[in-house]
Image (tube, rainbow, N blue to C red):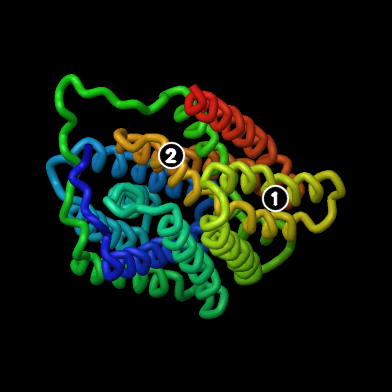
Amino acid sequence: MSEAKDLSKVGFTKVTISFTLMGFTSTCWGAIVPWLAREIDVPISTMGVIFGIYLFHTLLGTLTVQAFGKSRDLRWFIRYGLLLSLIGFTGIFVSPTPLLMAIFAAIGGFGKGGIGIAFLFLVTRSANASHFRMNVVSAATGVGALLGPLTIAILGSDRIPYIVMGSVIAAVITAWVYPDAAWRFARREKGSKSTHKPIPLLLVILGVVFYSGVENSIGSWIPTVAVNSGLTLEQGTLFSSIFYLLFTAGRFLGVWLSTRASAESIALFAVTLTGVPLALSWGSDAFPLVALIIAGLFLGPIFPNTSSWVARKTPEFPGGTTLMMLAVMGGGFIFPPILGYSIEGASATDFIAMILPLLAVSIIFFLFGGRLWRKALAH
């Protein structure tokens, strides 16, 4: 078992603020990629690769915290992870060549992965963790996700470096004031066994990989798809902000639902409903950009409720939360860069045709994983 401590109301408030700032920075990438491509005159696919390098190193950062989490407390990982993020984004914006950008993207991504899993441990594995709290911090992330592209749409793409760096600096400043993060996971005693069921956990994790691919692909490529449809980058970023507005509304809907339904039920319901607007739009060729935006409402509650679901099913296995985070990052690392090579000139309808199969696979894994977990509990 872990040496987890309570997360006080003050600590929870500060963690919530940090989740907001993380959401803000993350969703700015949808505008950062085409803006940088334009500034240094490289193909959008090249910037997609650099974004992929950033995402890949978030995986490495997450694995590092899991591997060394027993030797350092969570507060240490949060502080120094944010410093690496600051160094990474600074380098990305001042580097004159794609090669240097890729190096700094790796540094920033590594830091982001470390702080992401550390924050998730704080919320899902603290002694007083709750399904409700996970939905609240995820709603806060959604608020940040909305404000990122909205701020760029309002202030203009030329101010992207100042907007992003302001958010990262604010996060670094707050990182030194966490009162409840000075704990780490104890090493498991020899001979002790975990009671978690690996097969249903694996299925749900695979479902998260494909769901994350859909969510991150929509969030990353809406501005580009909008530009392909004849809109300006600012207009495309505005579409992205509307997507995250509904995404945030979905997160707040999850907060309300968390007091009325189980995490499993909410996650399964939301991932299934995500396919409805996409399938209807793709089949009728009507308002595809609008369908992508509406999908955000149903994507919103999936991550927090799946996180709580996994944590509840694996109380003696902190690695379940790490696998959950790796799955989210893995889906974001694998699918958006791949789609980046396919959307040069692609319409929104074509884009929907690319992501619908990913969503279908995700739904299948979620349903079968949930079914096996329920059977295991019945026995």
Q: Foreground mark, 2 or 1? A: 2
Q: Is residue 253 above or below residue 71?
A: below
Q: Is residue 146 visible?
A: yes
As helix, strand or loop, the secondary structure at mark 1 comes to loop
| 272 horizontally vs 61: left or right | right
| 74 horizontally vs 346: left or right | left
Tell me which residue sits at (59%, 67%) in the image: 245
Q: CA distance from mark 2 to mark 1?
A: 39 Å
Q: Is residue 47 above or below residue 362?
A: below
Tell me which residue sits at (61%, 71%) in the image: 234
As helix, strand or loop, the secondary structure at mark 2 comes to helix
The residue carrying mark 2 is 310
Q: Is residue 92 above or below residue 317?
A: below
Q: Residue furthest right?
A: 284
Image coords of residue 165 (percent x, y): 35, 69
Tell me which residue sits at (56%, 37%) in the image: 210
Q: Is residue 15 above or below residue 113?
A: below
Q: Which mark is residue 345?
A: 1
- Look at the image and tell me in which quarter the N terminus lies: top left
- In the rendered structure, which amino acid carries the disc numbered 2? Val
| 357 horizontally vs 338: left or right | right
